[in-house]
Image (tube, grey):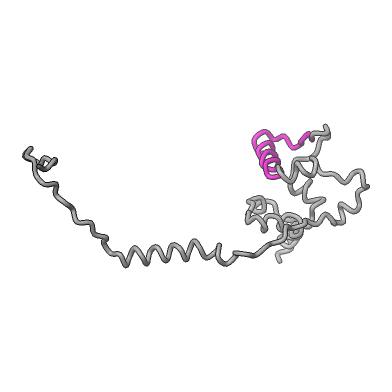
Amino acid sequence: MADYKNEFGWFAPKPTVEKKIYSLKAVAVGLGIFLVVFGAPLLLNMGQVHPVPQPSLDTPAIQKLAEKERQCVEPTEWMRANHMQLLWDWREQVVRTGERYYTTSQGKKVLASLSNNCMECHSNKSQFCDQCHNYVAVVPNCWGCHLPKEQNVAKAEGK
């Protein structure tokens, strides 16, 4: 006795549906392309070790400062971890409220400006900023508005 009732309510053998994989070739080709496209970067970099960048702090502006004055607006470790959030907060503060000064954790007031504060000491953008950003494959949008001084001079001179 079958345990399946058909559309009339009668017991009947359960109908079987033939399972068929349609276009097996297309599925295999698609899977192969997927593996090549998404697996190639992993395979190409497998076994390679890229050295951690060592940003250069040897700029003329930093060398001019006395040893005790060679400190950033916040401690170095804090800046390494939070510089993007600080710059983001400065941007919001300056644009939204017009407040152009930032009070550091040591109580010192500094100008909240990437171009006129940070880049004064870190004038070597390619050796300081770009090294780490390239290493972690981050493209900050800061440089859309804030050009490094060399580019500002070249732009003003029409080069």
- The correct choice, above or below, for 3 with respect to 131 in the image is above
Work out which residue is located at the far front of the displayed protein and give it: 1
For residue 149, say whether it is visible: no
Tell me where residue 52 appears, x and y as whole percent: 72, 57
Along the line of sight, which residue is nearer the eye, 114 or 45? 45
For residue 97, say whether it is visible: yes
- Residue beneath the point at 75% across and 49% down: 115
Q: Is residue 87 left or right of residue 35?
A: right
Rendering quarter of residue 81: top right
Tell me where residue 37 appears, x and y as whole percent: 48, 64
Q: Is residue 47 left or right of residue 79?
A: left
Tell me where residue 84 appears, x and y as whole percent: 68, 45
Report the quarter where the N terminus lies: top left
- Residue beneath the point at 9% across and 44% down: 12
- Residue beneath the point at 64% across and 35% down: 96
- The correct choice, above or below, for 60 with respect to 159 in the image is above
Report the quarter where the C terminus lies: bottom right
Tell me where residue 2 appears, x and y as whole percent: 11, 43
Check residue 102 for magenta coloring: yes
Rendering quarter of residue 43: bottom right
- Residue beneath the point at 68% across and 55% down: 133
Along the line of sight, which residue is nearer the eye, 13 or 40? 13
Give the residues in magenta: 83-104
Check residue 86 for magenta coloring: yes
Q: Main secondary structure of the magenta part?
A: helix
The count of marks equals: 0
